[in-house]
Image (cartoon, grey):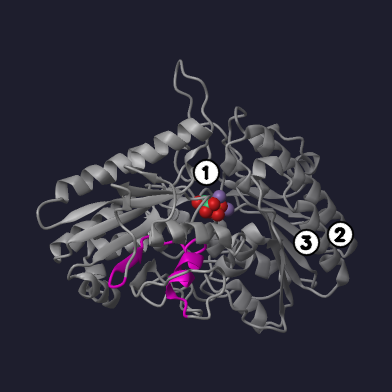
Amino acid sequence: MEKRPVVLVVMDGMGLAETHLGNAVQQAHKPTLDYLYASCPHTRLRAHGLAVGLPTDGDMGNSEVGHNAIGCGQIYSQGAKLVNENIDSGEIFHSKAWKELVAFCKDGHKMHFIGLLSDGNVHSHINHLKALIKQAKAEGIHEVRVHALLDGRDVPDTSALTYVDDIENFMGELNDDTFHACIASGGGRMQITMDRYEADWSMVEKGWRIHVQGEGRKFASATEAIETYRKELGVIDQDLPGFVVAKDGEPVGTIDDGDSVILFNFRGDRAQEISRAFDGDASFDKFDRVKVPNVKFAGMLQYDADLQIPKMYLTEPPKIKYTLTEELCKHGIREYAISETQKYGHVTYFWNGNRSEKFDEDLETYVEIKSDVVPFEQRPWMKSAEITDELCAAIESGKYDFLRTNYPNGDMVGHTGSLTSTIIGVEAVDLGLQRVMESVKKVNGVLLITADHGNADEMYQAPKEGQPLKAKTSHTLNRVPFIVYNAKCKLKTDDNLGLSNIAATVADFLGIEPNEHWNESLLK
Ligand SMILES: O=C(O)[C@H](O)COP(=O)(O)O
Ligand SMILES: [Mn+2]
Ligand SMILES: [Mn+2]
């Protein structure tokens, strides 16, 4: 095959749904995508469940597992599954980290659990938290404090109380004369603690003050905080401000010297910054931690093995080998990756099997466009134009053989639950694609277009008879497109094909032999 530059575009969160109702992808004015579907080879891929290493086909896809699969051409058991197995076998409680943390806080100190309180299974699962609390009691811990990040992004938008009630009932049943567990602090996941890719460290600082120092608005319970904020602000769970649970004016669970802290999220992007705040020495300068308690800290997983974030962890992360980048570097292929902050790590860190370091400084170029820190329903176009400017220039420069990008709009705007804004987000992507096509055509390249999972394709929850439609903020279980522009080819259409079939396809178009460990190419 003649050597031509290959460009791969991931339209984050733009899946394929049958229904038109609430489908921002279908409802958008998208002449470019319409043209591509009408005139170019295309197929559908699985982007959820077993096809991306999740426990069951009931699990929706997400960016981590999606970009891992695209970037390594294989299916690895992912965090959600590995933690389940580690807990089911009891191995987790024999890990070095668990033993050290238990021993450290046993006498008169507290064990803290910080994490996303839901069953979304994207960053965490409430069942994992329950298993850890139960075992903490069994091993003689007296005090447990939960710092609950409220979801509403991977689960229904106002479901926080379901999970708060669930964990409080669970802890209530365990509580007795020797053991006391309760919620100590929390807040919406888009307000505190769970920033990613250094988009907004002030979120992490807010979380630190609330969880560690007990500094924030005080309430008698998490329920009171949620109900009060909902009444006052009318916002959905992910946007609820931080709160501290207090009794007689005193926080019930600050993080103090001698305590142990477990971050029970398994996914890495939104877990790294708070981990760095806990693990960081005196040189940590992202915000003023005021006082750093002498604690032992562990993550549910190690979120970046090269950078050792965090140093202690309960579950071994998937060891993703034979990545596309590694293989392309061996062949001297010059790579270019670009996105805006919110998805920058998706096309670098997740893409390369959760490694943020480059394989080859000379062959790889990474570009980050700074994301705005605004509610994305107010700026649904996000940085699509700026990404496109840079990408088109890179394509036309002739300096790169393989270029990739992620347009975040369908996903980031989709998560806000606003159908109108998400339609505009999809239109911004469509405009970007049109410009990318022109550049690809100029250099006689090949353009591949796909998505990592659905989101914008279903903006309403399943309708319930007699009730008004409710916004849906989470991802979907739908298939995603795979489209080839400017290359004559025939694509396979088997129902079992998924994101892990893309790596070999890219290799085919670049004219190199796919790695033997990769799943088959989509080319017939
Ligand atoms: O972290 C998030 O924003 C959501 O939980 C998942 O979205 P992503 O998998 O598309 O990043
Ligand atoms: Mn995504
Ligand atoms: Mn998403």
Please indicate whether residue 516 sits to the left or right of residue 177 in the image.
Answer: right
Residue drawn at the location 15% of the way across and 56% of the way down: 179
Position of residue 399 measured from the top left corner of the image (x, y, whole percent) = 82, 75
The residue type indicated by label 1 comes to Asp
Q: Which residue is mark 3?
A: 446
Task: Tell me the tag on residue 439.
Answer: 2
Magenta span contains residue 272: yes
Residue drawn at the location 58% of the way across and 33% of the way down: 18
Nearest to viewer (mark 1 / mark 3): 1
Q: Which residue is mark 1?
A: 239
Which element is circle 2 on? helix
Task: Tell me the tag on residue 269.
Answer: none
Quarter of the image that includes the N terminus: bottom right
Disc 3 crowd rating (10 Å Cα; few below 14, some 14-19, many 20+) is many
| Marks 1 and 2, how far apart at CA | 39 Å
Position of residue 188 measured from the top left corner of the image (x, y, whole percent) = 47, 47
Q: Are marks 1 and 3 in contact (CB under 8 Å)?
A: no
Q: Are marks 2 and 3 in contact (CB under 8 Å)?
A: no
Please indicate whether residue 298 sits to the left or right of residue 242 in the image.
Answer: left
The residue type indicated by label 3 comes to Val
Residue 345 in sight from this viewpoint = yes
Disc 2 crowd rating (10 Å Cα; few below 14, some 14-19, many 20+) is many
Name which of mark 1 and mark 2 comes first in the sequence.
1
Q: Which residues are magenta?
A: 257-281
Residue drawn at the location 66% of the way across and 61% of the way down: 341
Quarter holding residue 114: bottom left
